[in-house]
Image (cartoon, rainbow, N blue to C red):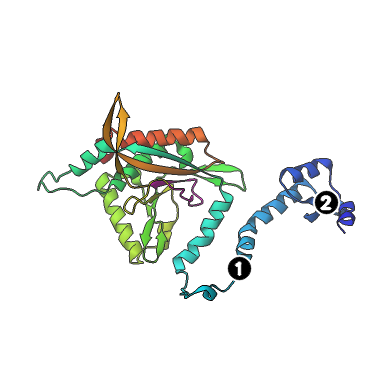
Amino acid sequence: MSEKKQSIISASPKARKFARELGADIHQIHGSQREGRVSEDDIRSFIKASLSEKVPKKQAIVTQEYDHSEFGEIDIQEIPRIKKIAGPHLIKSWNEIPHVTHHDEADITELEEFRTSLRDIHTGEKIKITPLAFTIRALVKALMEFPNFNSSLDIENQKIILKKYFHIGIAVDTPHGLMVPKIRDVDKKDINAISSDLKRVSEACKNLKIDKKEFFGGSITISNLGNIGGSFFTPIINQPEVAILGIGRAETKQVFINGKYENKIMLPLSLSYDHRIIDGAEGARFCVHLKESLGKDFAYKLAV
């Protein structure tokens, strides 16, 4: 049967080579040219259609292989609505984006000393600013220096869309599931305004009182696990963005500096990026810039 099918497929050697390079079976491709001849455009269309059907096909074959109740007591619950919505999006991002995750640590000793020393100039009361607000400011400075991280990929037209705005997505853990609202125009806000926005969107998400449009139009996302625990992990890029920054819990460590050990507060950073747009060298430079902005003598600059 396969030999007969192969004998009636008409395609040029160039088209056949093109199909092999893309891993496409030319015998499954319908030719649009005269007498069913397969062209390179037919191959491209076939690949595009296959990719668009990739996620549904994978989901369709996932079945329960056996009855779990045979082995003991179980409790069956509904998947929360938000997780049902997020699940296919996460699968699509993981399957379509070639992820690379760069792990590093930032010395935030000076930043923490500065942050915890902030007081109201009128009342003298301590001002509570979350460390995340400083990280957001530092992240925006890095985006300005490395614009590829503030972009999206237009696959159909083979273009990179560079964004001139700075809207930072924040992964918010809620009883209903994970939500990612955006803090808008961060480059135009001081540290107090950013901190206030963080509280506002977090409460809105937890109370399900946030507008759907707040989940779209981001530059980059931050997934902060610092208040829970852990160090390094691999955050999944929030498509159509091209990068996401994961933050672990800061810890005091002994660091060898200038011939001696010193206690430093180190912040774990996990930066995942789309390798189609960002290469390893650019990813490393981005992390170095971010570390410097969070490091010694830079904290006060992030507050203004």
Residue underneath mark 2: 33
Asked whether, in this view, residue 96 is left or right of residue 261, the answer is right
Residue underneath mark 1: 63
Q: Amino acid at mark 2?
A: Gln
> Which part of the image, by quadrant, shows the N terminus?
bottom right
Residue 251 — which label? none
In magenta stretch: residue 241: yes
> Which part of the image, by quadrant, shows the C terminus?
top left
- Is any part of residue 163 visible from this angle? no
Question: For the point 62% across and 62% down, which residue is it?
Answer: 56
Of tags 1 and 2, which is closer to the observer? 1
Where is residue 240 shown, x and y percent of the image?
51, 50
Of the image marks 1 and 2, the number of the one nearer the N terminus: 2
Whether 199 is drawn above or below 23: the answer is below
Where is residue 115 shown, x and y percent of the image?
22, 42
Asked whether, in this view, residue 176 is left or right of residue 33, the answer is left
Quarter-of-image position of residue 109? top left
Asked whether, in this view, residue 285 is left or right of residue 98, the answer is left
Observer-nearest residue: 181 or 257? Answer: 257
Other-residue count near label 1 (Cα within 10 Å), few / some / many at <14 / 14–19 / ≥20: few
Quarter-of-image position of residue 284? top left
Q: Which residues are magenta?
A: 233-247
In magenta stretch: residue 207: no
Tell me whether the residue at label 1 lies in contact with that at label 2, contact meaning CB atoms closer than 8 angstroms. Answer: no
Question: For the point 33% across and 35% down, which residue is it?
Answer: 293
* Element carrying mark 2: loop
Observer-nearest residue: 203 or 228? Answer: 228
Whether 95 is drawn above or below 253: the answer is below
